[in-house]
Image (spheres, rainbow, N blue to C red):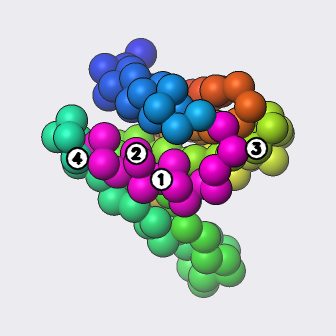
Amino acid sequence: MKHGELTEEIIRIFYKVYNTLGYGFLERVYENALKIEFRKAGIDFENQVPVQVFYEEEIVGDYVADFIIDGRVVVEVKAHLGLGVSDESQLLNYLRCTGKDVGLLLNFGKEAEVKRKVWG
């Protein structure tokens, strides 16, 4: 599995944060906790990464990815009751626009939820 060891470590950290904080906070709270754990684990990351959408070599949209881990994996943090098709589409679009091929959706909902997506 591509980037399997890295995605397993990210998921382990996700569950540590989820089990510590539980359900009900805003996404930003979970992002901040993840940053602490990524640093403790020595994982290289960028947070709130600008993502641009191009059409015929012109920018037609600007978004922000929650994390890019080790320059290889896009991580999108959610705090919904459950993940939906639009959440998965958002992650796939971020993968397309960043040129990365592996992404994780981490949902700090009523129940912890992880989805791994591969582009290409």
Instruction: Say which amino acid is labelled 3.
Output: His
Furthest residue in direction left, as rendered: 42
Q: CA distance from mark 1 to mark 4?
A: 12 Å
Q: Quadrant of the N terminus?
A: top left
Q: CA distance from mark 1 to mark 3?
A: 14 Å
What's the magenta region?
Answer: 23-38
Is residue 55 placed above or below 27 in the rendered structure?
below
Q: Is residue 95 magenta?
A: no
In this figure, which residue is indicated by the disc labeled 4? 39
Q: Is residue 32 magenta?
A: yes
In this figure, which residue is indicated by the disc labeled 3? 80
Q: CA distance from mark 3 to mark 4?
A: 25 Å
Q: CA distance from mark 4 to mark 2?
A: 9 Å
Give the percent coordinates (x, y) of residue 47: 40, 61
Instruction: Say which amino acid is labelled 2.
Output: Leu
In this figure, which residue is indicated by the disc labeled 2? 34
Is 55 in front, or is 84?
A: 84
In this figure, which residue is indicated by the disc labeled 1? 31
Instruction: Confirm whether residue 43 shows in the render.
Output: yes
Is 24 in front, or is 96?
A: 24
Q: Mark 2 falls on what kind of element? A: helix
Residue neighbourhood size for the residue with mark 3, other residues' Cα within 10 Å, grouped as few (<14), some (14–19), many (≥20)? some
Is residue 64 placed above or below 27 in the rendered structure?
below
Q: Quadrant of the C terminus?
A: top right
N-term mark: 1 or 3: 1
Q: CA distance from mark 3 to mark 2?
A: 17 Å
Q: Mark 4 falls on what kind of element? A: helix
Query: Residues at badges 1 and 3 in contact (C-beta under 8 Å)?
Result: no
Residue 49, image quadrant = bottom left
Query: Residues at badges 1 and 2 in contact (C-beta under 8 Å)?
Result: yes
